Each structure stands twice: as C-alpha cells, then as structure tokens.
Image (tube, grey):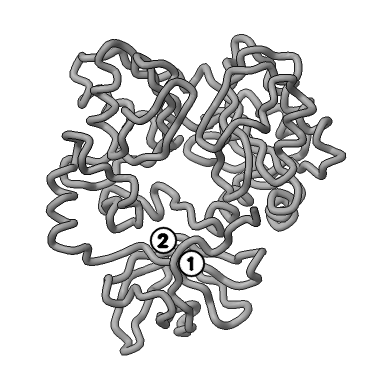
Amino acid sequence: MLKRTPLFEAHRSFRAKLVDFSGYEMPLQYKGIRDEHLAVRNNAGIFDVSHMGEILIRGERALEVVQELSVNDASRLSAGKSQYSVMCRENGGIVDDLLVYCLSDQEYMLVVNASNIEKDNNWVLEVNDGRAEVSDISEEIALIAVQGPESGAIMEKLSRDKPSEIPMFEFRSMQVSDYDNILVSASGYTGEKGFELYCNIRHVNVCDLWDNIILAGEPNGIMPCGLGARDTLRMEAGLALYGSDLTEDHTPLEAGLGWLVKWDKGNFMGKDALLNQKNKGVGRRLCGFVMKEEKRIPRSGHAIIGAGGEALGQVTSGGLSFMLDRGIAMGYIPTEHAEPGSTAMIRIRERDCPSEVIRLPFYKRKK
C-alpha cells in the first residue's frame, strides 16, 4: 500500500499523473514536464515535497552529535540558519545528503531524502549513542516548495512578515495565508530563488494553503509541478540526486562536494578515510556532459566511453535540458579524463555519441 502525503487530494483535484516514488503516491506531472520546468525558470512553480524526512536532535549535546554526523561545520550556525551537508560512513561513503537547520543552540533539524528516512534515522541513533534526544517527525510535517523568479513576489502577497527578505540558507517562523508558525526557508532544489514551507499538519490545512498559494500566484504565472520537472530542474542546476549520483559507494570528494568538508572542525564520521583519499588523490570525479549532437538524449546506465574506446564509467543522471535544448548527463569518470572541454562518448542505442565534459552546473539562473 503506497503512502500518501497530506496534499494527495490536491494532486487528484488537479488531475496529476500519479506514480510510486519512494513508497509514496506522488505527482509525476500535471500539465507536462516541459511546461512545468519552464514555468519555474521563467515565473514560478509549486511542489509537494512532503515525502522528505525530518529528524530532530535535541539536548545539551545536540551540536556534538550533529558535528559527528555531518561533514560540514554546524557550529557556524546560529538559530535561523541552515547549511547543506552530507553524512558519511566511517569509510567515507555517503549515507545521505541533507540540510541541517539550527532551531536553537540545543535543537537541530536534519532534512533527509525520502528513500533514506529509516536508514538515516538508524544511523543518527547509532552515532548518537544516547547523548541527545532523537525524534523522527517526518509524519508530522508537510513540506511545500515555491520556486522561481516570481516566488518572492508571490510569498509577499501571503505574509506580512517579509519572506522575500530572508537570505539564502536562512529561515523564519512566520504567518503565511491564514496560518501562523510556518517555518519558511529560503532554499530549494531547482537552481532558482525559492522557498520551502514546513507545516505541522496538526495546525495547518495544507490543501487549503496549497490552493491559497496557487490563487495568489496565478497573476505571476505559478504552476503546480511534479517530480518530473523537479528532476529536470535539479539536473540542469547540477544538483546531485541520492541513489543515482550519490551513494555509499561514492565519497563527497569524488562527488564534487569536497567544499562541504570542514577538516579543522574536529572529528566526524569518515574523516580519516576522506583525509586519506585527499592525500592520495581522488581517482574519479562526478562530471557533467553536454551532447554535441541534437536529439541525443543520454539516460541513466548508458556507458561513458573514452576517445580510445576505453570504458570510463556510466551515466548516473541523464535527460534533456530544456534551457540548453541539448541532452545532458552526469557520471563518474577517472580524474585524468575529467578535464572540462575534453570529449567523451556516451553510448546511446549502440551508437557512441560525442559529448563535452563540463564543470557543473549546466545552467545557472540570472542574478
């Protein structure tokens, strides 16, 4: 039996095409992936991301626990700020990528991927070892994302608390529409300006809130968006997806996330293994690939071939960039082949098609 988010009836009323995603019955698309993608790039889109997980860590030793779990430095956070990070096993493999929210100096919220909630919670409990109070509150939280260049103007119509003034990777508890105490975060997974709204379902009718956001955003071109557009948007922005581009077989150094690792903050899970890899040199890297020919669309699992015919790796994410009008892909290849501007072949339907290796992202929003 598939789970349903608190917004399921809203999706059904909008006649969304529903699919199984990480055990949830979720909207793949409404009007169409291309239209939804371009709405976010040019105007605004609204997404249901309530399937994401939220884990609270509370107590006098909460920061100590978060510091061991996260490769980033949570001691740099004060209440109302967040940061992107990854959790690693002792061997440096990525358990998950996540956002760390500092609610207070003794309370942190980890926002994790839907497919990893149980695994992540077990890992947090193992590392915690009884030092802090750990609570999986995922079932209590509905999460709505409003993304795109018009997102600030739309949010301003719904709140007197000036959400558009929230800096990136900061958040505020504020009134939105008819509801108080919604945690509004200036963050997202699209490469555009946007917000994520964390709603406690005991106090917020999220279907009503969803409808109110769409009503306020209609003059700004807002469009409900599904998982299809979420995937094409994040891929275009060069944002990795756990389970595809990030796994326990990859380290943050290989995935181009070495900038997250704060070596001088003290001990954390995976530090020794990552430091050893750093000193020896990273043997493979996650790269971007732009197809040189039109209508060549790479897909996950396609082989990446070197100029001499040697196997380099395989595509971890692939598809069509609507902004570039070209096929794009991500994948791990040996470091010596990862120089931007070099050529790699991607095998599509038994044909080796040329692509250019690039440094991510594929697309960056205009300021």
Residue placed farthest to the bottom in the image? 308
Q: Nearer the viewer, residue 75 or 21?
A: 75
Q: Residues within 10 Å of mark 1 (few under 14, many from 20)?
A: many
| 114 sits left or right of 120 in the view | right
Residue 237 lies, in percent from the top left, at 54, 56
Residue 266 lies, in percent from the top left, at 18, 34
Assess whether mark 1 and mark 2 are in contact (beta carbons under 8 angstroms). Answer: yes
| Number of the label disc, if any, that sits on residue 357 | none
- Which amino acid is tagged 2? Thr
- Which amino acid is tagged 1? Ala
Residue occupying image coordinates x 59% and y 56%: 232
Residue occupying image coordinates x 25% and y 23%: 65
Residue 276 lies, in percent from the top left, at 12, 53
Q: Is residue 347 above or below residue 105?
A: below
Q: How many marks?
A: 2
Q: Residues within 10 Å of mark 2 (few under 14, many from 20)?
A: many
Q: Quadrant of residue 308?
A: bottom left
Residue 310 lies, in percent from the top left, at 29, 83
Q: Is residue 243 above or below residue 125?
A: below
Residue picked out by circle 2: 316
Residue picked out by circle 1: 329
Lower sequence index among marks 2 and 1: 2
Q: Quadrant of residue 61?
A: top left
| 191 sits left or right of 310 in the view | right
Q: Nearer the viewer, residue 156 or 21?
A: 156
Q: Quadrant of residue 183?
A: top right
* SS of the residue under disc 1: strand
* SS of the residue under disc 2: strand
Q: Nearer the viewer, residue 160 or 181?
A: 160
| 138 sits left or right of 90 in the view | right
Q: CA distance from mark 2 to mark 1?
A: 7 Å
